[in-house]
Amino acid sequence: MISNIDIHSSVAVYVQIENHVQFAIASGRLGPGDQLPSVRELSERLEVNPNTVAKAYRDLEVMGLLYTRRGMGVFVNKGIETKCREECRKRIIGRLHEVIAEAKASGMDAEDVNEVVEKSLSIDSSPYGPTPPQLLNLAKATRKKSR
Amino acid sequence: MISNIDIHSSVAVYVQIENHVQFAIASGRLGPGDQLPSVRELSERLEVNPNTVAKAYRDLEVMGLLYTRRGMGVFVNKGIETKCREECRKRIIGRLHEVIAEAKASGMDAEDVNEVVEKSLSIDSSPYGPTPPQLLNLAKATRKKSR
Amino acid sequence: MISNIDIHSSVAVYVQIENHVQFAIASGRLGPGDQLPSVRELSERLEVNPNTVAKAYRDLEVMGLLYTRRGMGVFVNKGIETKCREECRKRIIGRLHEVIAEAKASGMDAEDVNEVVEKSLSIDSSPYGPTPPQLLNLAKATRKKSR
Amino acid sequence: MISNIDIHSSVAVYVQIENHVQFAIASGRLGPGDQLPSVRELSERLEVNPNTVAKAYRDLEVMGLLYTRRGMGVFVNKGIETKCREECRKRIIGRLHEVIAEAKASGMDAEDVNEVVEKSLSIDSSPYGPTPPQLLNLAKATRKKSR
DNA sequence: GTGGTCTAGACCACG
DNA sequence: GTGGTCTAGACCACC
């Protein structure tokens, strides 16, 4: 239930929220039909402007990950898990290439990189930085699946 | 001598310039005492406003990488090569860990990751992402060391 | 509420602003979490260009004294009051030593120096020199703490 | 014979030179009629552009501290020692007031200030910062008094 | 509304 | 010639 939105981060708050949701779906913590916290609830929990949460939900709806049922709330779409996972995967691969390109540009060689990669792979859950968006609790006790 | 500043990138132009210089120092293409292109010269070469270049130079001076001699130009500080390289390295390693942690969390296994890494390492200059800062030629034939 | 920015001073306007903010934090007139006047507001009050104020704010953010919440404004960081005060103190003490060393070297004796010091201490706000940064009112009635 | 011109300093090189000379006169290390090093010699010693030294000498001549004898060199004027000393004194007192005003503004009280002052007065020759301009050797073995 | 970025152009101090 | 500073005004993203 800990908010790991970083208001000091340079990445926009609404993007952080979008990442969290996308990631939760890709990793299965949010399944098809699951209800998300209401805009108001989440905004209070994150101590963030409701508009910010609303924007994230709207964006995610446009992306096809969420849908809203009037008066009911916002829900995870069906049949988008694999698509979402692949998108995440693509994003991650892109970033990986990016980082490695920079590593080479700054003088690190293949051996250096591989060493770091191995080390990182062997760690269970690495405590690096505030960005990896996997901890925000998006489940709600009283939340039910939409039919 | 190719400018690979991307005006349309989401990362600010002055940040791109800062990265270029930082990487040039880290990789040894720019050594201690070397003079950088003048603000005006570089701004013309990159087709950006002189203020933008000046801002990058000033930031780098604050970071301790450069110093300016009034009326003379901007120079690379001495005794910061290894510090700079290590800082670059640390930043990159941090991001690498970050990305790989996300990769694992989103379901990729070690094999997947290694495959991407290998592929990325074998490419010369990968066209992924918005900021692979290695091509900007910061040397000048007629430029000499300060002092 | 008096602006004592001196446009004609030899010290840059943005540096004067930085000093004001720094001193305000060091002396407690600006506390952690306090919001600063908006760039536009302060620029109007001081009759300087908004960019000038923005530059000061950005510098102070780089120094770690301020942080900005996008679309919300600029705020004083937490846990930097004592660090800031000590830094100010150290800087001042350094300059004090410097000046007194010169005073001695140029033939003034302890009595001379003490006399000047006493006189200076007894004055409320001394009109000496170009940068006595203590009068700019950085508080706003309707401003509230962040978070 | 050590140059303590600081090319990394923010204060202009020519101003540093002017301060050195002025200080040397005020403290008696340069007496009336003494010859100064030639522009060329000093510029080489300080590893500085000759124009810079020339400008300093010119300024000091305008101030009335130096005079040049065509083909002979630059000399210290007579009867300006006390005037010069007083000017130095005034400058130092001004800076003292300035620093103490800032000290008060940043929350230091009289006791704090006095403590620092006492400590500083008790030290023989304080090694603070690069600015106190008293070490530049402006004498020359082969230099003679002008008649 | 907030700040961030960039442009264009001016003036100044320095060397 | 060099960089430093400031202005005026524009556009953008964020909240």
Image (cartoon, coloured by chain):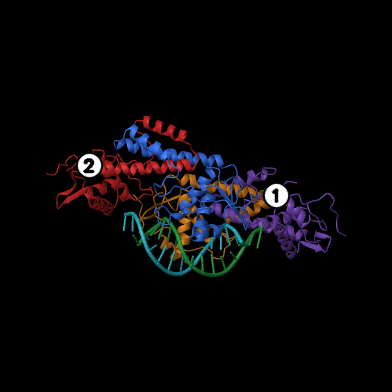
Chain colours: A red, B blue, C orange, D purple, E green, F cyan
Q: Nearer the viewer, residue A130 or B83?
A: B83
Q: Secondary structure at mark 1?
A: helix
Which numbered dot is residue B88?
none
SS under mark 2: helix
| Residue reaching furthest to the top | A122
The answer to whether residue D121 is seen in the rendering is yes
Q: Is residue A78 left or right of residue F12?
A: left
Percent position of residue C130, x then y: 58, 60
Are there few (<14), some (14-19), or many (20+) residues within 10 Å of tag 1? some
Residue holding disc 1: C104
Q: What amino acid does circle 2 point to?
A: Glu
Could you tell me which residue is drawn at 14 percent across and 52 percent down? A71
The reply to whether residue C60 is in sight is no
The foreground one among D14 and A131 is A131
- Residue highlighted by disc 2: A81
On the image, the x and y values in percent for residue A65 come to 22, 47
* Quarter of the figure that contains the N terminus of chain C: bottom left
Q: Residue furthest right?
A: D147
Residue at point 67%, 42% (across, down): D123
Q: Position of residue D41 (x, y in %)?
A: 77, 53
